[in-house]
Amino acid sequence: MASSEGQGRFPSPFEVAAPPGCEGWEKMYPYYMLFSEGRKDFEEGKFWLCDLLHHPEPFYPFDTLWYEYWWLSLSQYNSRVFIVPPALGIDNRILNGYAYISANAIMDPSVVEARVAHFMERAGYYYQNWDDLYAKWEIKMKGLINELKAVELKPLPEMVSVDDVKGARGQTEAYDLIETYDKLINLGLKAWQHHFEFLNLGYAAYLVFMDFCKKAFPDIGDQAVTSMVSGIDVILFRPDEELKRLARAAVELGVSDVIREITSPDDAIARLGQSDSGRKWLNELDKSKDPWFYLSSGTGFYHSHISWIDDLSIPFAALRGYIDKLARGESLDRPLQALRDERERVSSEYYELLQTEQDKQTFNQLLMTARTVFPYVENHLFYVEHWFHTVFYAKMRDLAKIVAAHGFIKDPEDIWYLHRNEIREALYDMSAAWAVGTIARGPSYWPAEIEKRKGILNKFREWSPPPGLGVTPEVVTEPFTIMLWGVTSERIADWKAPKPDPDKITELKGFAGSPGVVEGPARVIRNVDELTNVQQGEILVCPITSPSWAPVFTRIKAAVTDVGGIMSHAAIVCREYGVPAVAGTGFGTKVIKTGQMVRVDGSTGVVTILR
């Protein structure tokens, strides 16, 4: 990337002050995740992107866990495992609670060339044996989740059992608690080691296919390329399919009115348990819940993103919507066959345009590879961010009850204000005091510290992080940055330009995420709690979307997001549901208001406010 300085430049990370009242915020996060004087020249010489796609909220100290783990895991597969020729890893930092990332590219052509043979051997093996290796990956992940479920966090007893004494066990519950916590944290790291085993290769296969298409067909649009790999059947859509199955079963068993009329899931379940048909439906519900209700209401990166299994009001609200659609005689099916017919039509037309047999063979090979590997790009989300994380957070809440019982925190939910390393220190403090029979320091230290951190995080939420820091890139060429985060040269120019009055903006530009042109009333949604407000035929406007929002895509006319590129989750899901979408508008949620009539052109990436 070339760079420029001067007017409109991004601030140095060392120039950004903490919001008033947040002095000392750095103590909440590990030293290695902070911008520091010891690395100042290096850090000021790079461009840092605020990663609102994955981390739209400031971090609770504990919730840095997954940010740290993807920093290590993603980067190692690029740099040390598959030896991706032009790319190393991605650096991560935290500034005033928000995530900033910076990709490290290899600029020396000779070094890139030297890495090619290694990549071809290693990545080539995965591409050639993808189905077998992926089947093994699923076994590994399910085994890891079962191992996590078996973790049991036990409180410290008044005295060790006499059976342990006579059995010469030689260790106590204090050791067990610390060891079990370490195991819990290490299982989290292991899950993220598995997470990226295939992911970068899945994206790389698509990028190689797109690069071939761009060179062979200079005028081809990104949507034409994405259409050739659409019509996928991935397990991330399975939770939504289970809701549709349950809606149909409710109608067939004659219990749909109970679900529609009793809004409390607990009350509805109690009523259903009073009849044979209701009990039959509850049996079907139980079949769906494990594992398909282990679906986070958000990205899965935050403990506050409660999953379906822990809050049935989320799936039950979607169930009522599906039952209503069935009552109107509408289909619940997504247009899978139509998407597959379209992808074959587009693929065939471009194939016929190729002039040589070698190009045709390469086209087919790259297309088939992209279609084979692409489902993993979505599937891994369910196994790790949703299923594994849901079980993990439940175990952490078990631990929090123990810590709260010893007075280290006032409320179990306060555990999230401690970093994972601080929790381990607290467990040792607690165990040592238990062993000695004296007073631990934690109860007089942590509650006050947590109150201070609560105030800091509240101020962070009111603060608007700069979209970029450091060296200003003039040209963005890194494909992952464009494809996933939706960051282009034009977007960066928009960030640097003077901000217009939001009330005077009538047009927004983003990525053409999913084709089609529609008009309708906007519904601005900023968190999952507001999803129940979305009405049939509205246009969803939101910062990002989550897999658990899938039922909403059957109600809306179109979707508009603040962040994300053409391969962001929102864009992929909208294409699979046949819903027009514009991704990465930058500030759609700040400009568009609920009720305004808007036109969404998912073919050109333009959103127009009509009135």
Image (cartoon, helix red, strand yellow):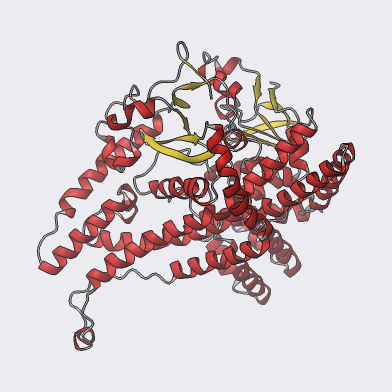
Q: Give the answer, above or below, for where 496 lies relative to 221.
A: above
Foreground of the two, 452 or 503: 452
Q: Where is residue 434? Give x, y as percent.
A: 16, 67
Please name whichever residue, 99 or 19, is drawn nearer the observer in this view of the structure. 99
The answer, for residue 243, to whether it is visible in the render is: no
The residue under the point 63% across, 54% down is: 376
User: Where on the picture, by quarter, is residue 163?
Assistant: bottom left
Quarter the C terminus occupies: top right
> Furthest residue to the top?
7
Where's residue 161, x and y in %? 21, 82
- Residue 549 position, x and y percent, is 61, 48
Residue 564 appears left or right of 606: left
Asked whether, in this view, residue 132 is left or right of residue 300, the answer is: right
In the displayed structure image, the side of residue 420 where residue 136 appears, left or right: right
Above or below 223: residue 260: below
Occupied quadrant, residue 518 = top right
Count of number-bearing discs: 0
**For residue 59, which quarter of the picture?**
top left
The residue that appears at 56% across and 26% down in the rendered structure is 587
Q: For the point 71% across and 63% down, which residue is it?
A: 245
Residue at point 60%, 44% (across, down): 116
Q: Position of residue 440 (x, y in %)?
A: 14, 58
| Of the pair 293 and 269, the residue shown nearer to us | 293
- From the viewer's perspective, is residue 97 above or below residue 240? above
Q: Is residue 214 visible?
A: yes
Left or right: 44 in relation to 159: right
